[in-house]
Structure formats: structure tokens, C-alpha cells
């Protein structure tokens, strides 16, 4: 406050200085002419500075113009403009422009600090004018130099002004010096204050411009990052993107979008190409969906087949939305994504196929069970006999299904089918398996052979060789000329007699199994034991045509 | 007890599942029908459809991996009525044969009887 008062005082005194005593017309005219010339020069300088600011040149040029102008107007020997800058990382630092001396004259010194001489300037408080800074009471108090550093420009006359923004922020300071003392007048103080104001406007304008630039730069980089991320996400999701101008039907497709229609990135792909590429049966559905989306702003979401130029048929899922430029107005553009969903569609088709196949298999199995019940009922003499026989047949069928399930219903090995029935006989020692080459049975053949072996085994346990302790069954097979020759031979059992009537087992073996597999099955009731000779073509067993 | 119109009827049976064809044979025998076949595969079915003396047919839609429709075409050409039997139900029947009755497996004996009666009196 005290300093401000002093400045105000010095301004007042300088005003009175300009009122000179009357020293005669010529001298007065000369003085007026000189004052006019001074004014003209100042005006020119001010115009130059104004032009530099107006032209929006870089801050170094403007600041240089300001300090040059200040030097010119105050007839100083040296001028300096120290100004604060904030860099991209938010750090503040000080730059300077010089007039009347090369930059090397200052470059080796640290920036002016808040010493008693500089503080009023850098804190934005006051203009300081000193006729001889060396004699100034504020000079030389601070370590390490206690005055100007060695080699400093020879300054005696000193004039400085803070450069302060309208909001009160100190932007920097203007300093003028002369090697001779007493060179600056009160008028120079006013000039420097004015130039400082121009400097502040210039620096402020530059700051604003930088901030705007930085903000738009940041905005641009946010947008660029978003676009990049979006493009990455689309790529990662194998999504194509597209845009359609509703009126002109201008259609733009991304590279991936084109790829979804079998087009190369460099191939043109317009709206007509898009519509033409869609499968005939799906085209109406697609165009209707698009028209609806355009008319009522609903989501466009449609799956259709496309025919690639190479003839491939692929599935594409397209999604999008129409967008009115004027709120409430009719849609002008449409944009969205496209996705190749061929694999998903095929998986769905496979799944449907599998479900159908499963249903088919279950229904057939139910019909098989119905058949077993139907025929067991016809031959069973008592309900208990029905239950026992039916259960045993059901378990045999179930066991074969277990084998097939283990192999994903691709089939089962003949050996495994026979082993599972032999195990059910209760004791491997009773049945001797002499295996031949491995035969891979289709599911149908496995069920048929399994049921056949089950009937033989059940009969052996009930009436045949296995109905007595010493009896033995031998199961032997070989493959000859594409025919499986499987022989079931019972021995050491009770004396065999020809059955009174053909039961389910013999019918299943001799008629069913033989017919289903296109071979022959012969049961021989020999006295020493029953034999069963199966002659079945390998092609039917293994499912080859 | 059963419909007299079925007695002595010669019925071609096409069925690749051994136990199912045995069941159908028994059912038909109960009606007094004479079973032709049963044909366990497409080729046997086609041969019988073209040349055997038959009054009606029961065709499994899928025999040993092949669809039976060409056999149905041959029967149609000869004017022999037929019904389908299928684990897929009516959904498995396509083309010109949608009008033919379809028995979905498993079916009751009476369903088979009605289907056959419908075929021979239609």
C-alpha cells in the first residue's frame, strides 16, 4: 500500500514535470515539435505492438515486439521481458526476451528472484523507477551476489513494471536499464505501464489461445482414442461397421463389413451391391426391416444369408439404428454393425439335427421296449416270469446303450458287447471267449447282436449248459471273406431236446438278427449242446455300403 | 375282433430295427394280414415295392441311413396305398407325401389298425 501511494505520488510529480516554464516561442515550438515527434514515435510503436498482437504471431515474436517497443519509447539501452509460461505438464517456468543486448548477455544468469528490487514487479505490486539503482536503498541486500552478478549488463538507470492480467494474475515483468544514471522520466513510467498493459493482453491472448488449442487437442485425442478403441473392439469382435445415407442411399462399409460379404477392402460395395448379395429368400425380410427402422426409429436387427462372389452362402447378422438429424424429424442416416454368424448358425443347425436325432433314437428305443414287452407277454406263463424275463431283456438293452454312450453313440466293439453279456452270466470261467479280430459294430448292429447274445445266454442259464455246474460255453469268432463267423457252442450240459415251439429268442436270432444284418443265423439243437452259428456280413455290421 | 377288411391284406413292411419289425409283424399277424418283407434296407424295400404282390405298405421314413421317399414314389405310381412310421413324427415327412398318414413311434396296435383300415377303404 505504501508503495502504491509512492507510485501515485511519483505519477503526480511527473505530470507536473511536463509543465515547463515559458522559455520563448521558438524553444517552445522546438519542444512541441520534439514532443510531437515523441508522440508519433510512441504511436508508431504502439501500433506495431498492436499489430503483432492482432496478427496472432507466436508469443516470442509478440513479447519481442513489446520489449523492443519499450526500449525505443524510453530510449533505454537494454530491455527485458520476463514472462511466465505453463508447459504441457503443468509446470510453470519463466522465459525472457531481450532488447539492446544479445541473449548470451543473460543466459548464464539465474532468473531474477524476488529480491527487494524485483519483488514489487514479480508480485505485481508496483512500477519501480530508480535514477541510480546502485545507490538505491533496495539494492544489494541478497546473497550470493549482493547486487548484479559479475559480468551483468552495466545498469544504473532502472525502470520496471509488472505485467498483470485483468484477473490480477502476474504474467511477468518488463525491465529497462541504461548505463548512465537518471535517464528515465516519470513520462517513461507511464509509457512502460502502458506497454506492460499491452504485454499483458498479448500474453493473456496467447495463453487463451494455447488453452483453447490444448483443449481441442485433448478433445481430438479423446475422440481419436475412442475411435481407436471402437475400431479395436469391432476388429476383435469381427464386427464390420456401416453407415447409410437414407435419402441418397450412399452406403459406406468398413473393411471387416466388406469381408462379411466376401469383398476385399479395395472393392467397392454400395447399397445396391449389399441388397443384391442377400439371399433371394431373405431379401424382402431385410429390406422391410430396414424400412421399418427408418420409419419409426426402431432397432434394425436382422439375420440373413448372403451369397459371396465365390458362391459361398454365409450368414450375416446386421444391427443398426436410424437417426434423425433434427429431433422428431424423419431419419436421415442409419448406422450399425455387421457380424458373420455362419459358425453360430451352423452350430444351431447341428444342435437341431442332434436334437432331432436324439428324439428319433428315443422314440425308436421306446418302440423297441414296446416290442420286447409285447413279445415277452406272449410267451410268459406267469406275471412273475414276465417281470423277470422283461427286466433281464431291458437290462441287456440298457447295457448295450451304456457301451454305445461311452463311444458317443458311434458304435461299440464286438468284444465289449460279448464281454458285457458274459459278465451277466455270473462267472467268466463258465464262458470261454476265443476272440477273433476286432469288429466295430454300428449302434444298430450292437443292439441287435447284444440282444441275440443275451437270448443265447439266458437260454443257456435256464435250460442249457450253464444250468448245470460242469457246463461250459465257448464263444469263438473269425472274419472270412468279409463275413463274421461267430459260433456259440455249449458243452457238458444236460441233454438237449428240440423245443416244443419257437420262442422269442430263436425268432430274434434266426429271423430278426439274420434279416436286419442281411446274413444267416442257425440254431442247432445237438444232443451234446446247443450251437449257434452266425454268419453276418462285415459291411452291415460296420455300417459300410 | 379286428376289421375284416384287413384279413388277408398283403402288407409290405419296411423297418430296419429288428425288434420294431418283429413287433409290427406280430401286430399285423393279429389283424390277419400277410407280411411282405420285412425289408431291412432301402434296396430290399425298392425291390419289393416294384415287384411284390402288395395291397398296402408301412414305411419307416429312415432305413439304415436312407430316406424312403423314392420307395413311396414307386408305390404311388403303382397305386399302392402306404403309411409312414417314423421316430421323427410328421415333421420327418416331406414333399408330395404329406398327405400320407404318419405313425409316430412308438404307436399302439390300434393306431396301426386304424391307419391300415384308412388306407384300404380310402
Image (tube, coloured by chain):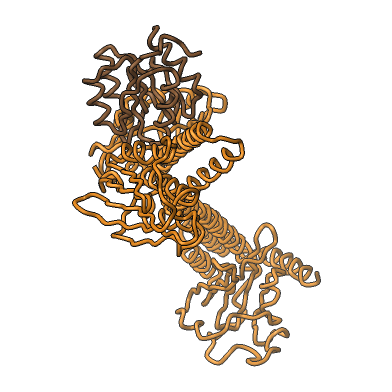
Relative depth, front residue between A512 and B98: A512
Q: Where is residue A360 drawn, in percent x and y?
A: 44, 35
Is A326 drawn above or below residue A388 in the view shown? above
- Residue placed furthest toward the left: A481
Q: Is residue B33 left or right of residue A139?
A: left
Left or right: residue A289 compared with residue A277: right
Q: Residue at x 28, y 11 (%)?
A: B79
Q: Quadrant of the C terminus of chain B?
A: top left
Q: Picture quarter containing residue A276? A: top left
Q: Nearer the viewer, residue A341 or A71?
A: A341
Is residue A279 among what the camera can see?
Answer: yes
Instruction: Using the image as rendered, state which of residue B34 and residue A417 is in the foreground.
Output: B34
Chain B colour as displayed: brown
Residue A340 seen in the figure: no
- Picture layout, residue A265 above or below residue A37: above
Say which colour chain A has: orange
Residue A209: % across, % down? 53, 55
Residue A424 against residue A515 in the figure, above or below: below
- Give the image location of residue A15, x and y in percent: 70, 63
Q: Residue at x 56, y 79 (%)?
A: A178
In this view, the residue farthest toward the top is B121
With A255 as the anchor, is A347 left or right in this view? right
Q: Nearer the viewer, residue B25 or A472?
A: A472
Count up the numbered dots.
Answer: 0
Residue B85 % position (x, y) = 41, 25
The residue at 49%/64% (across/down) is A65
Amino acid at each position: 500500500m505504501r508503495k502504491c501511494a509512492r507510485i501515485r505520488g511519483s505519477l503526480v510529480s511527473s505530470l507536473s514535470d511536463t509543465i515547463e516554464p515559458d522559455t520563448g516561442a521558438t524553444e517552445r515550438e522546438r519542444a512541441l515539435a520534439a514532443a510531437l515527434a515523441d508522440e508519433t514515435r510512441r504511436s508508431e510503436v504502439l501500433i506495431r505492438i498492436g499489430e503483432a498482437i492482432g496478427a496472432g504471431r507466436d508469443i516470442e515474436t509478440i513479447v519481442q515486439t513489446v520489449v523492443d517497443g519499450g526500449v525505443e519509447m524510453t530510449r533505454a539501452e537494454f530491455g527485458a521481458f520476463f514472462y511466465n509460461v505453463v508447459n504441457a505438464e503443468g509446470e510453470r517456468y519463466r522465459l525472457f526476451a531481450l532488447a539492446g543486448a544479445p541473449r548470451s548477455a543473460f543466459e548464464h544468469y539465474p532468473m531474477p528472484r524476488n529480491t527487494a528490487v524485483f519483488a514489487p514487479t514479480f508480485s505485481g505490486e508496483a512500477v519501480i523507477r530508480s535514477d541510480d539503482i546502485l545507490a538505491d536503498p533496495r539494492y544489494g541486500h541478497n546473497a550470493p551476489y549482493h547486487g548484479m552478478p559479475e559480468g551483468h549488463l552495466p545498469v544504473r538507470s532502472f525502470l520496471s513494471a509488472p505485467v498483470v492480467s485483468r484477473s490480477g494474475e502476474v504474467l511477468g515483468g518488463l525491465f529497462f536499464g541504461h548505463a548512465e544514471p537518471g535517464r528515465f522520466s516519470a513520462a517513461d513510467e507511464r509509457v512502460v505501464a502502458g506497454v506492460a498493459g499491452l504485454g499483458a493482453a498479448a500474453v493473456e491472448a496467447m495463453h487463451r489461445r494455447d488453452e483453447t488449442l490444448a483443449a481441442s487437442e485433448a478433445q481430438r485425442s479423446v475422440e481419436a482414442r475412442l475411435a481407436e478403441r471402437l475400431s479395436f473392439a469391432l476388429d476383435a469382435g469381427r464386427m464390420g461397421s456401416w453407415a447409410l445415407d437414407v435419402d441418397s442411399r450412399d452406403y459406406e462399409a468398413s473393411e471387416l463389413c466388406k469381408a462379411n460379404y466376401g469383398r476385399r477392402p479395395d472393392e467397392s460395395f454400395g447399397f445396391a451391391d449389399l441388397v443384391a448379395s442377400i439371399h433371394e429368400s431373405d431379401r424382402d425380410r431385410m429390406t422391410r426391416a430396414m424400412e421399418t427402422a427408418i420409419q419409426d426409429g426402431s432397432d434394425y436387427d436382422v439375420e440373413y444369408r448372403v451369397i459371396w462372389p465365390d458362391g459361398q452362402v454365409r450368414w450375416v447378422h446386421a444391427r443398426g439404428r436410424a437417426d434423425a438429424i433434427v429431433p422428431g424429424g424423419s431419419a436421415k442416416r442409419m448406422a450399425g454393425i455387421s457380424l458373420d454368424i455362419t459358425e453360430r448358425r451352423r452350430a444351431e443347425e447341428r444342435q437341431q439335427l442332434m436334437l432331432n436325432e436324439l428324439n428319433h433314437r428315443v422314440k425308436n428305443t421306446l418302440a423297441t421296449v414296446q416290442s420286447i414287452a409285447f413279445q415277452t407277454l406272449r410267451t410268459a406263463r406267469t406275471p412273475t416270469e414276465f417281470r423277470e424275463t422283461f427286466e433281464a431283456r431291458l437290462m441287456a438293452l440298457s447295457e448295450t446303450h451304456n457301451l454305445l454312450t461311452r463311444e458317443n453313440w458311434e458304435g461299440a466293439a464286438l468284444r465289449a458287447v460279448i464281454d458285457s453279456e458274459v459278465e451277466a452270466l455270473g462267472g467268466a470261467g463258465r464262458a470261454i471267449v476265443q476272440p477273433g479280430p476286432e469288429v466295430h459294430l454300428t449302434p444298430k448292429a450292437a443292439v441287435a447282436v447284444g440282444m441275440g447274445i443275451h437270448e443265447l445266454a439266458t437260454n443257456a442259464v435256464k435250460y442249457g449248459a450253464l444250468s448245470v455246474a460242469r457246463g461250459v460255453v465257448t464263444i469263438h469268432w473269425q472274419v472270412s471273406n468279409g463275413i463274421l463267423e461267430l459260433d456259440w457252442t455249449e458243452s457238458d450240459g444236460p441233454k438237449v431236446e428240440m423245443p416244443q415251439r419257437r420262442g422269442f429268442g430263436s425268432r430274434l436270432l434266426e429271423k430278426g438278427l439274420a434279416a436286419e444284418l442281411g446274413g444267416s443265423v442257425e440254431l442247432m439243437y445237438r444232443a451234446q449242446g446247443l450251437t449257434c452259428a452266425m454268419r453276418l456280413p462285415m459291411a452291415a455290421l460296420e455300417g459300410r455300403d | 375282433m379286428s376289421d375284416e377288411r384287413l384279413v388277408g391284406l398283403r402288407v409290405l413292411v419296411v423297418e430296419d430295427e429288428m425288434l420294431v419289425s418283429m413287433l409290427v409283424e406280430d401286430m399285423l399277424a393279429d389283424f390277419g394280414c400277410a407280411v411282405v418283407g420285412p425289408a431291412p434296407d432301402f434296396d430290399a424295400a425298392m425291390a419289393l415295392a416294384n415287384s411284390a404282390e402288395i395291397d398296402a405298405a408301412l414305411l419307416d421314413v429312415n432305413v439304415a441311413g436312407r430316406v424312403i421317399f423314392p420307395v413311396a414314389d414307386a408305390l404311388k405310381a403303382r397305386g399302392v396305398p402306404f403309411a409312414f412310421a417314423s421316430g421323427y413324427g410328421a415333421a420327418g415327412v416331406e414333399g408330395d407325401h404329406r398327405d400320407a398318414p404318419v405313425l409316430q413311434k412308438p404307436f399302439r396296435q390300434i393306431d396301426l389298425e386304424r391307419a391300415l383300415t384308412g388306407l384300404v377303404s380310402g
